[in-house]
């Protein structure tokens, strides 16, 4: 039995004979499917690499019990990948998708394999051995965010992917309401254990940019959600498009800054690539983004603070559930500490200490 990272048998999620029959109808090769192997990189959605008729494919589908609407997530991702086909955004090429949940129990799609690596999981010798290559990796990450922000929503048919009107005005009330909803979990330590989170929210409301230029945003843009090429520092693809929406792309830049490790490699987001020396600092990321974008970056600090605020509140939710015995206590404590670091980072930006 082949197991996914979360311990599930992928064969319970992908019926190969049924998939093969669907591929027959779609004209995707002939003969048996071979070499099916689960890929790492996702804690929720399944990635399965397979081979048929001289071609490799990667299948993506939701888990048996997704936290969100699994079918909706797949349909959203299909639409985004198709829309990005003729853009400069690095992404996995879309091959075909199935909206009919009768085939595999959910919507799913096939995409081109990405020949690359996740820097938060491993670093090939080329990248691990050269600080200049690692510096270029950070620059490539900033370039990817800028390219995404340059996508013309109307031209690629994604203007209706999200509600643009009032996007910035909705942010603080939305995440503030989520934070207060944790009070239903018995034993939660409450907002008083989160430092200046209330002051951060007030600052964001007072300093909110009056206008913004709508565009396409990834929604979870950081080092662990891109694949770098094996043969150099360039991005092979941006991955995990489940949070993508029409909104303010500068929040992707803010998210990158919020999760960017400190000079010593200390992380507030995903695991830090090792070695860390050579990667650019936050100011270099901003400067590089500015070269690839016509957006007004005068309020970049606000977006970084908002990203810290939003992510910190989301992570604290696991801690609240853990306090009530509804999640792992150990993981809850870890994410609580990460939330505190994010709120501290936000306070540093507000006070000009970053």
Image (cartoon, rainbow, N blue to C red):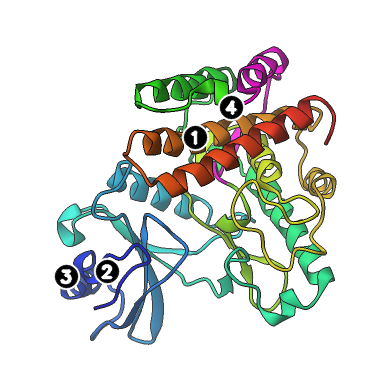
- Where residue 234 sits, quadrant-wise, is bottom right
Q: CA distance from mark 4 to mark 1?
A: 9 Å
Q: CA distance from mark 3 to mark 2?
A: 14 Å
Asked whether residue 138 is drawn in magenta, I would say: no
Q: Dot 4: within a 10 Å radius of its alpha carbon, few (fewer than 14), some, or many (20 or more) residues? A: some
244 on left or right of 128: left
On residue 18, the disc is 3
The quadrant in which the C terminus is found is top right
13 on left or right of 199: left
- Which residue is at a point 62% across and 19% down the rendered structure image? 201
- Can residue 153 be seen? yes
Q: CA distance from mark 2 to mark 4?
A: 39 Å
45 versus 175 height, above or below: below
Label 4 sits on residue: 194
Label 2 sits on residue: 10
Label 1 sits on residue: 316
Query: In the image, which residues are magenta?
Result: 195-220
Q: Are marks 3 and 2 in contact (CB under 8 Å)?
A: no
């Amino acid at each position: 039995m082949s197991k996914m990272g979360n311990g599930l048998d992928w064969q319970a999620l992908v019926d190969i004979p049924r998939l093969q029959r669907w591929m027959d109808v779609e004209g995707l090769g002939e003969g048996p499917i071979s070499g099916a192997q689960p890929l790492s990189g996702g804690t929720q959605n399944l990635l399965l690499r397979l081979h048929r008729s001289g071609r490799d494919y990667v299948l993506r589908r939701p888990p048996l019990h997704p936290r969100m609407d699994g079918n909706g997530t797949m349909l959203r991702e299909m639409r985004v990948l198709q829309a990005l086909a003729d853009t400069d955004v690095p992404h996995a090429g879309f091959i075909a998708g199935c909206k009919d949940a009768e085939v595999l129990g959910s919507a799913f799609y096939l995409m081109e394999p990405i020949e690359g690596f996740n820097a938060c999981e491993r670093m090939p010798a080329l990248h691990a051995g050269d600080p200049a290559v690692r510096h270029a990796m950070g620059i490539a990450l900033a370039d990817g965010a800028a390219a995404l922000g340059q996508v013309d929503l109307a031209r690629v048919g994604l203007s209706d992917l999200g509600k643009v009107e009032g996007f910035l005005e909705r942010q603080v009330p939305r995440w503030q309401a989520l934070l207060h909803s944790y009070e239903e979990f018995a034993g939660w330590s409450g907002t008083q254990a989160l430092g200046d989170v209330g002051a951060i929210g007030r600052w964001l409301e007072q300093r909110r940019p009056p206008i913004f230029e709508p565009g396409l945003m990834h929604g979870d843009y950081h080092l662990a959600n891109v694949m770098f090429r094996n043969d150099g520092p360039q991005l092979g693809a941006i991955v995990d498009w489940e949070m993508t929406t029409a909104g303010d792309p500068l929040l992707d830049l803010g998210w990158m800054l919020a999760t960017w490790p400190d000079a010593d490699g200390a992380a507030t987001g995903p695991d830090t690539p090792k070695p860390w020396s050579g990667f650019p600092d936050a100011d270099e990321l901003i400067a590089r983004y500015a070269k690839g974008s016509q957006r007004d970056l005068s309020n970049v600090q606000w977006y970084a603070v908002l990203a810290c605020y939003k992510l910190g509140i989301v992570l604290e939710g696991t801690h609240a559930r853990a306090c009530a015995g509804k999640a792992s206590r150990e993981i809850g404590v870890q994410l609580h500490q990460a939330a505190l670091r994010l709120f501290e980072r936000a306070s540093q930006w507000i006070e000009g200490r970053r």
